[in-house]
Amino acid sequence: MTDRLSDKAAAKQELLRKLQARPGADDPAVIARAAERKAIAEARVARAAEKAAAEERARIETAAREAAEQAEREREAERAEQERIDREAALEEAKKRARDERYAARKAAKR
């Protein structure tokens, strides 16, 4: 039983010794590690901000490209509609000329 108690006391003393041997907050190594962690955190924030800005630029470029494509499709649709209207007008004009020629031919045949 005394062996267990002495082992327990020795382990407790060893743990206390380790904790007391730990460097304090004013130790240069601790300060350097804290500064390094702070620099890493700041770099992480900067990368996140840069990534967000890049994503925003990509969204803006995509929206602009889609708007330009939509405008081009609308212009193409208007051009196609105008061509269709012009073809119909030309067809109607050709039909009218043919009808007028037939009418003139009938009139000439009656004389």
Image: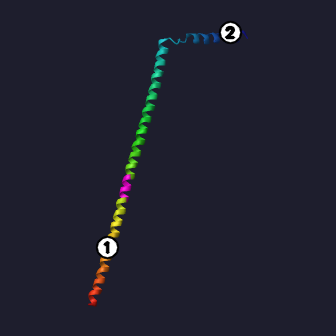
Foreground residue among 15 and 32? 32
> How far across and down, in percent of the image, does residue 77 sit?
38, 59
Please name the residue that numbered disc 2 is placed on: 6
Q: Is residue 35 located in the magenta-colored stretch of the structure?
A: no
Asked if 43 appears above or below 27 in the picture, the reply is below
- Residue projecting furthest to the bottom: 111
Left or right side of 6 for 56? left
- The quarter of the image holding the C terminus is bottom left
Q: Which residues are magenta?
A: 71-77
Q: Which residue is mark 1?
A: 93
* Magenta-colored segment: predominant secondary structure: helix
- The answer to whether 45 is drawn above or below residue 95 in the figure is above
The residue under the point 64% across, 11% down is 12
Q: Position of residue 94 (x, y in %)?
A: 31, 74
Q: In the image shown, does 9 or 111 lie closer to the viewer?
A: 111
Quadrant containing the N terminus in the rendered view:
top right
Gap between marks 2 and 1 measured at Cα: 118 Å
For label 1, the SS is helix
Q: Quadrant of residue 95?
A: bottom left
Left or right relative to 17: residue 75: left
What colour scheme governs how the chains and residues are painted in the rendered image of this protein? rainbow
Give the residue type that dot 2 points to. Ser
Q: Position of residue 87 (x, y in %)?
A: 33, 68
Q: Amino acid at mark 1?
A: Glu
Q: Is residue 76 magenta?
A: yes
Q: Is residue 80 above or below residue 34?
A: below
Q: Quadrant of residue 21?
A: top right
Residue at 30 percent across and 79 percent down: it is 98
Q: Report the residue at 61% width, 13% height from top.
A: 15
Residue 39 location, quadrant: top left
Location of residue 110 in the rendering, given as x and y in whole percent from the top left corner: 28, 90
